[in-house]
Amino acid sequence: MPKIVSANRLSDGIVVYLGADGAWLSALDKARLFGDDSAANAGLAAAREDARKNLVVDPFVVEVEHGGEGLRAITLRNAIRSRGPTVDYAPKPLPGTAREDRSPHVSL
């Protein structure tokens, strides 16, 4: 089964994937494919070097498969990670709430 290497970018926490040229990319379908465990572990070793350089956090190997829309992660966890947050992490105030009526600045 093909594999890729994933991590989170340290600067903003975005999920990233190791590309063929060693760059970290946000698109899963552009990730470098590793055909076996040995190659994936070599890619993971390179990713861990980037973690030591504080470029990414917690690199790991992800099993993928080819689907109708390109590569997709096998596990639910990594499928969710590849699509981005499942909730709005900058929620808007509900209509009619006091919070909506407040000015956007804070007095000190």
Image (cartoon, rainbow, N blue to C red):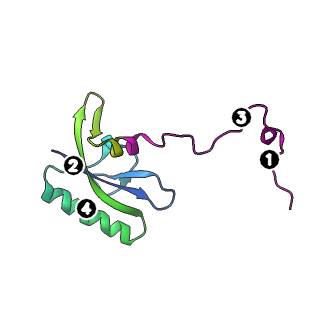
Neighbours of disc 3 within 10 Å: few (<14), some (14-19), many (20+): few
Looking at the rendered structure, the secondary structure element under dot 2 is strand
Residue 96's image quarter? top right
Amino acid at pointer 3: Leu
Q: Earlier in the sequence, mark 3 or mark 1?
A: 3
Neighbours of disc 2 within 10 Å: few (<14), some (14-19), many (20+): many
Q: Kindly identify which numbered label has been placed on residue 104.
A: 1
Q: Which of marks 1 and 2 is nearer the N terminus?
A: 2
Q: Does the magenta run of residues contain 84? A: yes
Looking at the rendered structure, the secondary structure element under dot 3 is loop
Frontmost residue, 29 versus 91: 91
Q: Earlier in the sequence, mark 1 or mark 4?
A: 4
Left or right of residue 39: residue 44: right
Please report contact status of discs 3 and 4: CB closer than 8 Å, yes or no: no
What stretch of residues is rendered in magenta? 80-107
62 over 93 or under it: above or below: below
Q: Kindly identify which numbered label has been placed on residue 3.
A: 2
Quarter of the image containing the N terminus? top left
Please report contact status of discs 3 and 1: CB closer than 8 Å, yes or no: no
Residue in view at x 45 percent, y 42 percent: 84
69 over 53 or under it: above or below: above
Please report contact status of discs 2 and 4: CB closer than 8 Å, yes or no: no
Q: How far apart are marks 1 and 2 (CA)?
A: 46 Å
Query: Picture coordinates of residue 17 (x, y %)?
Result: 34, 51
Please report contact status of discs 2 and 3: CB closer than 8 Å, yes or no: no
Residue under label 4: 44
